[in-house]
Image (cartoon, rainbow, N blue to C red):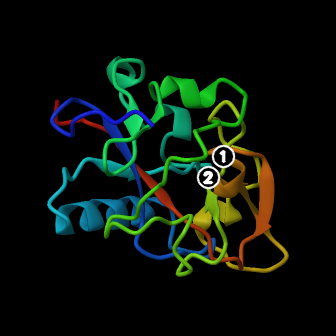
Amino acid sequence: MTTIPLSRPQLKLVALNQPHTGNFGGVYIADKMCYEQAKAMGLSAYYRAFLSSPKPRAVNKDLVPQKFRESYPVTNLRGDILFSNYKSIFTGGGGKFPPNIPIYSFDGRDVLADPFWPKKSIWHGSNTFGNMAVDRSCESWRVNDISIVGQSSSLSSGSLIGQQTSSCSNELIILCIETIEHV
């Protein structure tokens, strides 16, 4: 496991403090939850939900400003490197990360080990290249109907943007990515 000092530039990938169904009020509400939980923990407020949605906001691969996509490693909350850079997540291989690296919530819990998250999967709404997966975003993240699906990925498989579909009634993890817009 490679860890970099938290003082060095990096993009932190952090989970919200609780799981959510596919109806969390839309991507702007998820962005707001990322912002509020980061601020509450004394972190930079520059976090956005790691989600694609039909509109009106960018797809996953575009969340981080282009000038930072290849410059900084993506780490967990403690500085352990998950990806060499943001762009490397979206090469078409599902965003594989080292299985021994934990992903933490804003309040410091390991979402893969903590029973508070019974399903070790995340919502993402993307294809393997980080573009929106058509009709796989729980109707813009506003529906928790059992018959409607959203694109998700099992973190247990070591894949950040694996191509699974989950019923929007499931409570899954929502990740937030630091965008470093303050740099």
2 lies left or right of 21: left
Residue 39 drawn above or below residue 115:
above
23 lies left or right of 81: right
The structure residue drawn at horizontal position 61% and vertical position 60%, both measured from the top left corner, is 122
Residue nearer the viewer, 95 or 182: 95
Q: Mark 1 packing: few (<14 Cα in 10 Å), some, or many (20+)?
A: some
- Name the image quarter holding residue 179: top left
**Can you tell which mark lies on residue 124?**
2
Residue nearer the viewer, 161 or 77: 77
- Quadrant that contains the C terminus: top left
Q: Secondary structure at mark 1?
A: loop
- Name the image quarter holding residue 34: bottom left
How far is the residue under mark 2 from the one under mark 1? 14 Å
Residue 80 seen in this snapshot: yes
Q: Secondary structure at mark 2?
A: loop
Which residue lies under the disc numbered 1?
158
